[in-house]
Image: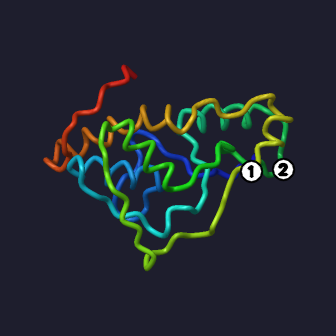
Amino acid sequence: MRLVRFHNIYGPQGTYEGGKEKAPAAIMRKVAEAPNNSAIEVWGDGEQTRSFCHVEDCVDGLTRIMESDYTNPVNLGTDELVTVNQLVDTVCEVAGKTLKKLHDLSKPQGVRGRNSDNTLLRKLLGWEPRLSLREGVERTYPWIWEELNRQSRAKLPTPKSNGL
């Protein structure tokens, strides 16, 4: 048996709307639906911190954990800590959009900070997630944009395909 604590996993083929999506997917959906030079709603003040792990790294890490002999709990996520405001900025850069953030302090923002401690992961496996948040967004945003475009909900510009 293996015990793995996942930290904010996101990526193509994931949930991007409906209330069960992770913050990166929700932000990517909002950005994709917003016309350039408009605004999107951001829950809280945007200064809450998180780490986000792309699904490719999650699958790689999970495979390595399952092949190991370690049976105690271990975190699986990145330790790249970013604010929600930084997440929005990264998605906007990848999308090629300029958007204003409208912070809604009446919405839940969760805990003030949460990050994956990968000390044990590095020690056990000599490995840690390799994709930065930006790289993960570059691999995920085009998929979300295309899903929304099929529903006539995505706004230009069309994202550049990353060839994956």
Q: Is residue 80 above or below residue 127?
A: below
**Furthest-top residue in this view:** 163
The answer to whether the residue labelled 1 contacts the one labelled 2, judged by CB atoms less than 8 Å apart, is yes
Query: How many residues crowd around disc 2 within 10 Å: few (fewer than 14), some, or many (20 or more)?
Result: few
**Display coloring:** rainbow
Q: Which mark is residue 128?
A: none
Callout 1 amino acid: Leu
Q: Residue at x 62, y 69 (%)?
A: 111
Q: In the rendering, at what x and y percent does residue 158 appear? A: 22, 33
From the viewer's perspective, is 19 left or right of 32? right
- At x 32%, y 59%, the residue is 40
Around disc 1, counting alpha carbons within 10 Å, would you say few (fewer than 14), some (14 to 19), or many (20 or more)? few
- Residue 147, horizontal then vertical, whole percent: 25, 43
Instruction: From the viewer's side, name the closer residue of 45 and 11.
Output: 45
Q: Is residue 150 above or below residue 63?
A: below
Q: Residue furthest left?
A: 152
Relative horizontal placement of residue 117, taking residue 108 as reference (left or right): right
Can you say which quadrant of the picture contains the C terminus?
top left
Residue 130 horizontal/vertical position (percent): 63, 29
For residue 3, which numbered disc appears in the image?
1
Label placed on residue 72: 2
Residue 70: percent from left, percent from top? 84, 40
Q: Mark 2 is on which residue type?
A: Asn
- Element carrying mark 2: loop
Label 1 – label 2 distance at C-alpha: 6 Å
Q: Residue at x 82, y 42 (%)?
A: 119
Q: Earlier in the sequence, mark 1 or mark 2?
A: 1
Work out whether 65 lies above or below 81: above
